[in-house]
């Protein structure tokens, strides 16, 4: 099989692989050992793929993307810091906000309508129910957009 890529497409592919590697590395390092085995194996495969494809960096006029680390080709620190890390940071920030908005919305829904009714709502797919859930989540998205976490307090 032969795949033809432009230098731009190659660069985009390598950045995408860098993002995948970054996410897998976070999971690999962030989870307890009994839960991260699959991520370790996938991360190792991505690392091998990245190293293999970076062998073509010079041919693709993308020498700046590759550097040698531990005897293997890897995405250069400069490319990682300039092109991959900002995307991972934005993704992580979004995921935190999304999880917080969702969890806080469900907390409010349970408080308002009770556990049993909230359970029914959780599995609902009708437009009215989804709009109701989104209304609760929107309250928190608006809060985070305007004030970040500055007004979030834990009372205990």
Image (cartoon, rainbow, N blue to C red):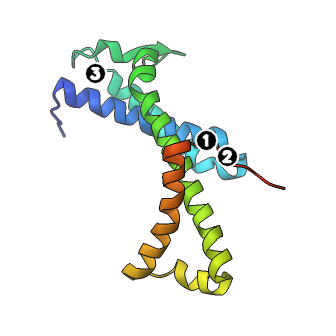
What element does badge 1 sit on? helix
Q: Residue at x 51, y 15 (%)?
A: 69
Reply above or below: 41 against 80.
below
Can residue 125 be seen in the rendering of this structure?
Answer: no
Q: Which mark is first along the chain, 3 or 2?
A: 2
- Tell me, yes or no, whether the two marked residues, 1 and 2, touch with CB atoms within 8 Å: yes
Q: Residue at x 72, y 49 (%)?
A: 153
Depth order, front residue of 146/125: 146
Depth order, front residue of 6/93: 93
Nearer the observer: mark 2 or 3; the answer is: 2
Q: CA distance from mark 3 to mark 1?
A: 27 Å
Reply above or below: 31 against 121.
above
What element does badge 2 sit on? loop
User: Residue 66 shows which numbered tag?
Assistant: none
View extreme (right): residue: 156
Q: Which residue is mark 2?
A: 31
Image quarter hosting the C terminus: bottom right
For disc 2, the neighbor class at 10 Å (few under 14, some 14 to 19, many from 20) is few
Q: Which residue is mark 1?
A: 28
Q: Residue at x 42, y 17 (%)?
A: 76
Q: Which residue is mark 3?
A: 56
- Total count of labels: 3
Residue 7: name its quadrant. Answer: top left
The percent coordinates of residue 33 (x first, y second) are 71, 46
Q: Residue at x 57, y 50 (%)?
A: 38
The percent coordinates of residue 108 (x first, y second) are 63, 70
The percent coordinates of residue 138 (x first, y second) are 47, 60
């Amino acid at each position: 099989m032969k795949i033809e890529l432009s230098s731009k497409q190659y660069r985009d592919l390598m950045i995408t692989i860098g993002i995948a590697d970054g996410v897998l590395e976070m999971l690999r390092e962030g989870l307890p050992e009994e839960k991260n085995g699959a991520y370790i194996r996938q991360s190792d495969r991505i690392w091998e793929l990245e190293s293999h494809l970076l062998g073509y960096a010079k041919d693709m006029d993308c020498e700046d993307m590759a550097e040698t680390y531990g005897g293997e080709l890897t995405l250069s620190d400069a490319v990682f810091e300039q092109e991959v890390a900002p995307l991972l940071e934005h993704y992580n920030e979004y995921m935190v906000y999304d999880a917080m908005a969702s969890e806080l919305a469900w907390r409010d829904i349970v408080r308002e309508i009770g556990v049993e009714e909230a359970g029914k709502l959780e599995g609902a797919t009708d437009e009215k129910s989804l709009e109701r859930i989104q209304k609760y989540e929107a309250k928190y998205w608006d809060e985070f957009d305007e004030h970040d976490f500055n007004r979030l307090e834990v009372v205990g």
